[in-house]
Image (cartoon, rainbow, N blue to C red):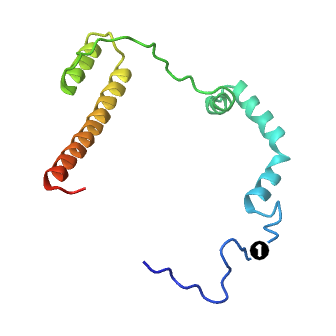
Amino acid sequence: MTTPKRPPNQWKPGQTGNPKGRPPGVSEITRLRASIAKHVPAILDQLVTAAQGGDVQAARLILERVLPPVKPTEQAVAIQLPDGGTLTAKATAVLSAAAAGDLAPGQAAQLIAALGTLAKISEVDELAARITALEVQRGEP
């Protein structure tokens, strides 16, 4: 593979065309934030007043910014998976536990996904072992 030639005027690797960099505070976003910043206290006061007056959207906006949304938490549950069984048997055991109410649906989905990933890893290991056996059989290093 050949490396493309640079035009003679172009900078060398590690060299910039603007060594001092962009001066701070000149971007459009920075200017926009600065122009809004002086009005933020008044905007917040109006938003709080609107929320206290019954404006549900104003109240929701304030609460979303102040209180993070509550994420569901699930307790750890011990389930019995068949020892030495197939991955299909283990997935069936997970689904049975979820159907019986012993396992939350989210936990069951995560375990099924983990079993799917384990199946892919096992498949790669098996294919690598087969390739190695074929190479040994053919006398290849």
Measured as percent of width and height from the top left, residue 81 is found at 26, 15
State the residue position of label 1. Answer: 18
Answer left or right for 37 relative to 109: right
Query: Can you name the residue that lies furthest to the bottom here?
Result: 8
Measured as percent of width and height from the top left, residue 121 is found at 30, 38
Along the viewing direction, whichever of 123 and 24 lies nearer the viewer: 123
Q: Which residue lies at the image location 22% right of the left edge and 40% below the top edge?
A: 126
Amino acid on which the number 1 mark rests in the picture: Asn
Query: Can you name the residue that lies furthest to the left here?
Result: 137
Answer left or right for 133 relative to 14: left
Measured as percent of width and height from the top left, residue 122 is found at 26, 36
Along the viewing direction, whichever of 18 and 27 lies nearer the viewer: 18
Answer left or right for 25 relative to 122: right
Q: Which residue lies at the image location 51% right of the left edge and 82% below the top edge?
A: 4
Question: With respect to residue 99, does 21 lie above or below?
Answer: below
Q: Quadrant of the N terminus?
A: bottom left
* Quarter location, residue 129: top left
Along the viewing direction, whichever of 51 and 133 lies nearer the viewer: 133
* Structural crowding at the residue carrying mark 1, measured as other residues with C-alpha within 10 Å and reported as few (<14), some (14–19) or many (≥20): few
Q: Which residue lies at the image location 25% right of the left edge and 45% below the top edge?
A: 128
